[in-house]
Image (cartoon, rainbow, N blue to C red):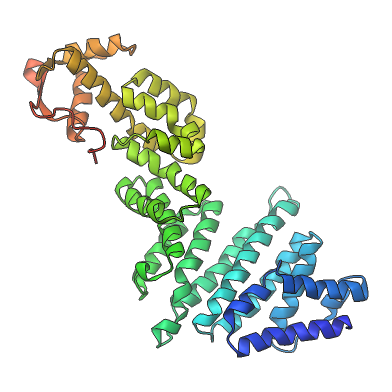
Amino acid sequence: MPSSTRLSKARHKFKALNNTKNGEELADVIKLDSLYTERVLSSVLKEDGCWDAVNEQEGRGVWDEVAIAHFQAAAAYQQRNFTEAYKYQLASYNAFLRLFRNMSRWGIQTLFSLCKDLCDVAKRADKQQPTNGGVQSSKVEEATRAINQGFSLCMTDREPQSDQSRKWGTYHMANILFALYQQLGAQNLCSSMISAIKASELPGLSSFPMSDQVTFRYYRGVLAFRKENYKSAKEDLMFALEHCHRDSYNNKTRILIYLTPVLLAEGKIPASRLMRRYPTIKAVYGEIAKAAKIGNVRKFDDLLKDREQQYVVMGTFLALERSRRVALRQLLRKIYLIDGSNSRIHFQRLCDGFVAAGLERLEVAEMEAILADMIFNGYIKGYLAHDHGIAVLSKQQPFPPLGTLT
């Protein structure tokens, strides 16, 4: 079959799938690495010995533009010319958006496929293209703006039949944008997108596929975590962990990277079985969690200092600093027990206990400040008698059990 005929048939196939609203098959064949795309390009290569026939095709309608740009992108992708592949993939995507405006729900799967490939080639193109005067233009940034248009077309759809609305693609598109915004370090854009979703007339998040819910709540939880809104972060990250597919080991590890410091600050020490199941979490947090649990404040401080750069890069350093209260709480409890569980304990006695634990001697005023913080945050129950220089501890569980703190 002549290559021009093969390409013509491929173009007609795209149009036919559109006419029958067969979104599932269209979403599959329009992927850069689909078997159908590979067969079409193999036929062209076999007939012409090169990809020139693809470039010579001239589209007559929008679907022709989508199809030809798609095969041009796939040809460049197979040749590992990712800059060219990105150019054509963006052209195919933009042409599709013109059609998508008049589509209903059936078209969102095709939008997802095009976006996935656009992200992939944009990242590869950025790695491949040389810098211009030391400044590299970002294909990922450009692709993000384009994908945001698709997100808007989903979120603002006015289809009267709610079950046929493009709105059902909103959270999936938001998740794609979350990943891109994170790569670009654009936290403010993540917040703006969440605000836009809140203001829109969307079905409840629980109505969307669980995969969309889990991914969205993971990213929203990470955003809350980075804003030090740990209560909201815990709620979203716990949901993501509990509803993540049981076999999604890597995704659960990503969730636990942020959830573990939040729980540790509440006195919830990771169980040994969790550490065994997720060795990455054990490597990152195992020792510091153990130091907090046994009240080895000196060890905790040394680990936090030695791994500061690692934790800063991960974005978890500030959250782990909060966990120091758990280590302090455990050390104070040890001193309390050694002192005979006396409900009245002098600040100076606690200062001496810190020295015995290998820490620098604190002034009484510094110890009083630590105790005030412990009491305020619920790690200790009692009050301070400043004039007498003593801490008056509750006779009923002066040190609430670890795991009950919030």
Give the position of the N terminus as an image quadrant.
Answer: bottom right
Image-based side of 361 in relation to 175, left or right:
left
Residue drawn at the location 50% of the way across and 71% of the way down: 151
377 or 341: which is nearer to us?
341
| Residue 91 in view, yes or no | yes
Relative placement, left or right, of 371 versus 244 is left
Q: Residue at x 49, y 67 (%)?
A: 172
Front position in the image: 84 or 327: 327
Residue 58 visible in the picture: no
Q: Nearer the viewer, residue 364 or 274?
A: 274
Q: In which quarter of the image is residue 293?
A: top left
The image shows a total of numbered marks equal to: 0
Residue 400 placed where, x, y %?
Answer: 18, 32
Residue at 44% in and 55% down: 244
- Where the C terminus falls, by quadrant? top left
In the image, residue 304 above or below residue 345: below
The residue sitting at 16% across, 15% down in the picture is 347
Residue 106, how many percent across, how many down?
53, 81
Which quadrant of the view contains residue 19? bottom right
